[in-house]
Image (cartoon, rainbow, N blue to C red):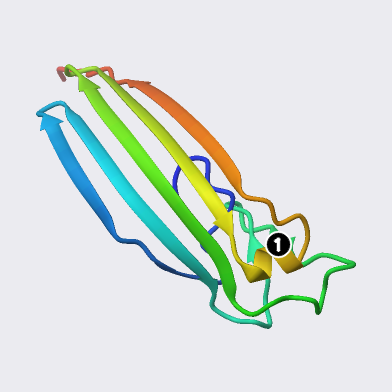
Amino acid sequence: FGLAAPLGATNIINIRPYVEIFPFPQIRITLGNYWLWRQSEADGTYTPSAIQNRPSPPFQGLDEGKYIGNQVSYEIFYSAGVNWSFFFEGAYFNTGGYTQSTGVGKAIHYLSFKAAYKLLLILLL
């Protein structure tokens, strides 16, 4: 669910409509919205590295159904020539009933930035 996602894909069902815009050949902008539910009410939610983070004591058994929340996000990818590329992402995660009933259920904002340099090596054998 993005570079700085608060959730991993374990026990998740999601719907993600999105649109991509190419204002220039080297720039791609993606706008999207994730709606997230737990696949099973008998299981919790997990971090991106598959470590369970909800529910935890004393919140076990207090959950409010399957709806986790929704995440509105934007991504900007810029290719600065053959070697350099840059990726910026921002998102707002609005919590649903399950998240609010199993611990601190406040909405969060997050940003992520990645720069990459690719080096092409040609080996002559």
How would you rate the neighbour count of disc 1 (Cα within 10 Å): few for under 14, some for 14-19, many for 20 or more? some
Name the residue rendered at 60%, 65% in the picture: 96
Report the residue at 54% width, 78% height from top: 39
Q: Determine the image quadrant of residue 11.
A: bottom right
**Visible residue check, residue 89:** yes
Q: Residue furthest left?
A: 25
Rendered view: 6 above or below 90: below
**Figure quadrant of the C terminus:** top left
- Residue at the spot x=22%, y=51% of the render? 19
In this rendering, would 40 be left or right of 54?
left
| Rendering coords of residue 60 (x, y %) | 82, 74
Q: Measured along the vertical axis of the image, is residue 113 above or below residue 92?
A: above
Percent across and percent down for residue 55 are: 76, 67
In the figure, is residue 86 to the left or right of 112? Answer: left
Q: Quadrant of residue 21?
A: top left
Of the residues shown, which amino acid type is indicated by label 1? Answer: Gln
Residue 115 location in percent, x, y? 38, 22
* Identity of the residue drawn at 44% across and 46% down: 2
Q: How many marks?
A: 1
Residue toward you, 105 or 22: 105
Query: Where residue 111 sits: x, y (%)?
Result: 50, 33
In the figure, is residue 66 to the left or right of 123? right
Name the residue tied to disc 1: 52
Callout 1 secondary element: strand
**Residue 10 visible at all:** no
Q: Is residue 12 above or below residue 47?
A: below
Farthest residue, direction right: 58
Residue 3 vertical position relative to residue 40 in the rendered view, above or below: above
